[in-house]
Amino acid sequence: MQLRISADPVGAPIFYRDVPLMPSETEGGVIKPLAASAVPLIDWRLRNVSETSSHVVMHDLHTCANCHSFAVNGKAMGMDLDGPQNDKGLYTLVSVRKQMTIGNRDVISWSSFRGELGSPLREGFMSQVSPDGRYVVTTIRPPGVKSSQFYYVANFEDYRFLQVFYPTRGIIAWYDSATRKLQPLPGAEDPKLVQTNAVWSPDGKYLVFSRAGAKNPVPEDGKMASYANDPAELPIQYDLYRIPFNEGKGGKPEAIVGASRNGMSNSFPKISPDGKWIVYVRARNGQLMRPDSRLYIVPAKGGEARLMTCNTPLMNSWHSFSPNGRWMVFSSKGRSPYTQMYLTHIDEQGMDTPAILIENSTASNRAVNIPEFVNVNPQGGIEHIATPAMEFYKQFDVAAELARKGDFNKAVPEWIKTLSMNPEDARVRNNYGLTLMRAGRTKEAIEQYRRAIAAKPHYSEAQNNLATALAGSGHSTEAIGLYRQAVKDNPDNAEAHSNLGRALAEQGQLTEAIAQFNDALAIRPNYSEAHNNLGVALVKKGDLEKAVGHYREAIRFDAQYSDAFNNLGVALAGQGEFSEAAEQFRKTLELNPKYMGAEANLGRTLLANGNYEEAISHLDNALASGPDSAELQDTLGVALAAQGQLNDAVGHFERALQLDSEFGEAQLDLADVLIRQGQAHAAVALLEKAERSHAPDIVERARAMLQKPTLQ
């Protein structure tokens, strides 16, 4: 064995994440990465390899921070953040100092750019800061692509490789911190492709990114992978491409020879500081942290790629060049199922050395990952990163959790406290409005929704919530306009489509309403409420058979949905299926014993099926516990008359006519009983009044009864 010592200094510290581990649920005596609930236990460290230990620079974060990058000049840091309620929608861009602070003003919400791009965003992916720190390049969803069509994700029980994750669609976009604009990069915005993992050249003049044909991430057979490199994984093989940045104008992408069309998947490129080399990850499928991932080096202009000497037997990825280009840090599981950091030296000819484990980077019950060299002084370049923005997210989640539990009176002051920390946050305004709405404070809720939209004009969720509040307050025209704007700003907002459909159906615009319900279900096929609402619209159109199908789907996806059971019963009764209809009403009452509408419907159905005694019991219950109704009084009278209880029946018919003196059905039913009691004169008076009804069927029946011999 021959040992050599390089004269090249490392010259910069390594920034990395230090993750605690926990016992595996599936394998005794084994530990695995910690669950998301323990995010505050994650440390972010800075390690100078010339020293024997590292120091913590960021700790006790309430929300997860992950993919990061530093400007080549060491003056800016960018990092993906999971925002409130773990929504993965934020990014921070901050100046690098000894004492750093991530405040609300330093946080970018990708979703705020949905209007400019014509497509709602949830997150950017693998974002990278430009060499001068001004720009950020990221991967976003193409216009018209749903969230579910963006990534292939499968989670495993194997603690060594817990997940496979890679984009299957995506375009490259760039953010300008000076203008605060986000826009696609021409030449890397083809929706028929997935374009991802873009990184900057050291001079900022071009980008290198991974590209493949776009695919639907959900396999046709619905089978997802159950372990890493399972043949059931969605196959995707990326090639590396180079494209000019050209001040955001982009250009023509060119495949990098040696790192494309080689029968493998090529991803996560990093360009050496002198611009001569690209080191990238090659694997059989997907990207980055795969069991078979290996590091390759290729000339930046393309050429013959070479398997690097530093590779360990298992998973080699997430690499970063030192500022002088002579050293590279990377992650591997070669000596442990938990990620460790390794160092290799690279000379001017691109030849690298065997890997050296960077020891003492963390405790034995923790793992290290996503390492990156930072171009700062190794001694104290970054001493601490304060995160007041995270305290805001923590307070947000406190209020949101109280609201989720239905404790609205306690949630309200917590939302007020959250607003005091960031009064311009549209999402806080919207969620505060939701809490006020559920507490019955509609007027105040409407004000908060309006302020949310003022702060974020294309905020589809707030538009939908404001529309719902207005619709409930009798302002249906304004509500419909807001619902339309909500689906325009976010075509993937299934709830807004369904609510718009319901509002249109209430105005009798059934054709468009049905189209909106179908749009909602195209986005969320398991959306129970949309299935139920579509069923209601179809009943109004007279299509009971299709309505029954959608009610059954609503119940299949939500077995506690009492309205859907009740509506299914009504539709079945309309088809003459009284026995099954009664069964659905009984299920409704099991779920909600106070549902008097279902009680009344069950009584009507039992009456239609000839079960008079039981029908009387349920109709009595409905009247005793629910609002008095002329129709229900009449129905109970009919049931009593069928049982021969004529005097009791007369009392209910008379009560029906007290509630509605022009109720033709009650007039006819009372007349029929009076005839049976021998009170012909009183019956004739009622029938003559019914003859003057505006309902042709009532008039016809009244005349027919007047022709009976007993009344002549």
Image (tube, rainbow, N blue to C red):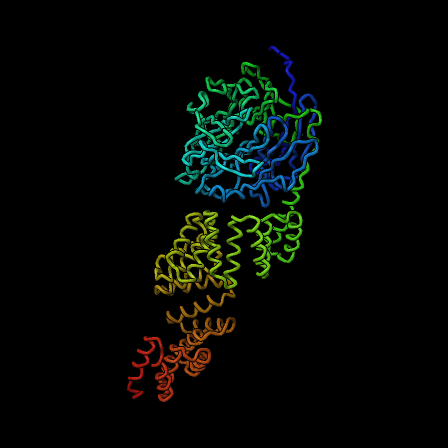
Q: Quadrant of residue 394?
A: top right
Q: Quadrant of residue 67?
A: top right
Can you name the residue that lies furthest to the top here? 2
Q: Quadrant of the C terminus?
A: bottom left
Above or below, 613 relative to 586: below
> Residue 413: percent from the left, percent from the top?
66, 55
Above or below, 228 relative to 490: above
Task: Identify which residue is drawn at 28% across, 84% down.
Answer: 707
Above or below, 460 relative to 371: below
Q: Nearer the viewer, residue 244 or 90?
A: 244
Task: Identify which residue is drawn at 32% across, 78% down.
Answer: 699
> Residue 273: percent from the left, percent from the top?
57, 21
Q: Nearer the viewer, residue 57 or 544?
A: 57
Viewer can see residue 184: yes
Task: Identify which residue is drawn at 37% across, 86% down.
Answer: 685
> Residue 203: percent from the left, percent from the top?
55, 24
Q: Nearer the viewer, residue 54 or 199?
A: 199
Query: In the image, 65: left or right of 183?
Result: right
Q: Quadrant of the N terminus?
A: top right
Above or below, 273 relative to 138: above
> Residue 122: percent from the left, percent from the top?
52, 42
Query: In the image, 631: left or right of 461?
Result: left
